[in-house]
Image: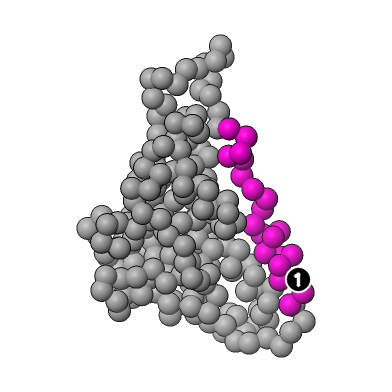
Amino acid sequence: MSFTVFGRGVSDGVTIDEATSPGLLRPPMMVEPPPAVREDQAGTPFALDRDARAPRDDSLRAYREAAGQVNREPTPVSVAEQIMSRPVLTIRINDTVGRARDLMAERRIGLLPVLGEDGRIEAVITRGDITRQRIRYSDLAKMPVGAIARFEVLTAGPQTNVRELARVLLEQDIRGMPIVDQAEDPPRVVGVVTRSDILRTLINYASLELWL
């Protein structure tokens, strides 16, 4: 099975058709402002601080990083483990949102797999999950990651075909996907494939060899 949905007490294999179905993953949760958060005269809640603005587009950064490598001899690429980002950076379910944002800013990444107490993946958190919250960042930063993370995570295996992986990222409109080794107990997150990884692969490798 190429794709698996993980969550609290859940580990269900899904087909490629199920993985690309619009209703597979629940929309991200929204944290409502606490009573202490006031609204301005126009009725608008306080916005996040300026530091919470989204960074530059990952696609442009991926292009610049790979621009000097486009002339090298291409090597056939076909599965997730060949293009995934590793070692993978993770965060615990009870860590704070502030720590998650700091890690993403420091490593220049936009997605973190969220692990439970037993080391199993339970959720993911992205920069967008943080910036879309209608609450002051000073309050949001103290909250646990689990309060805003996306549960029921769609994952792929190391041997998942790159073309299928790209198709699911597009159809589900998600930033990236954790790569999980099901052979280990508990299943271990071994990498992450993001849209930037897909773009970097397209730049570095001949299209005919990528889409065999």
Q: Residue at x 51, y 23 (%)?
A: 45
Q: Nearer the viewer, residue 42 or 130?
A: 130
Please tell me in which quadrant of the rendered image residue 158 appears. Answer: bottom left
Q: Nearer the viewer, residue 197 or 113?
A: 113
Give coordinates of residue 61: x percent, y percent: 69, 60
Q: Relative to 88, is 134 above or below?
A: above
Residue 50 within the segment the image draws in magenta: yes
Q: Residue furthest left?
A: 9
How crowded pointer 1 is (Cα within 10 Å; few <14, some 14-19, many 20+) is rated as few
Q: Residue at x 30, y 79 (%)?
A: 183
Q: Relative to 149, is 162 above or below?
A: below
Q: Main secondary structure of the magenta part?
A: helix
Please tell me in which quadrant of the rendered image residue 58 appears. Answer: bottom right
For mark 1, give the secondary structure: helix
Q: Residue at x 22, y 58 (%)?
A: 9
**Residue 189 in the figure: left or right of residue 63:** left
What's the image's color scheme? Answer: one colour
Residue 174 within the segment the image draws in magenta: no
The quadrant of the rendering that contains the N terminus is bottom left
**Residue 200 in the figure: left or right of residue 147:** right
Q: Which residue is mark 1?
A: 67
Q: Nearer the viewer, residue 102 or 47?
A: 102
Q: Which residues are magenta?
A: 49-69
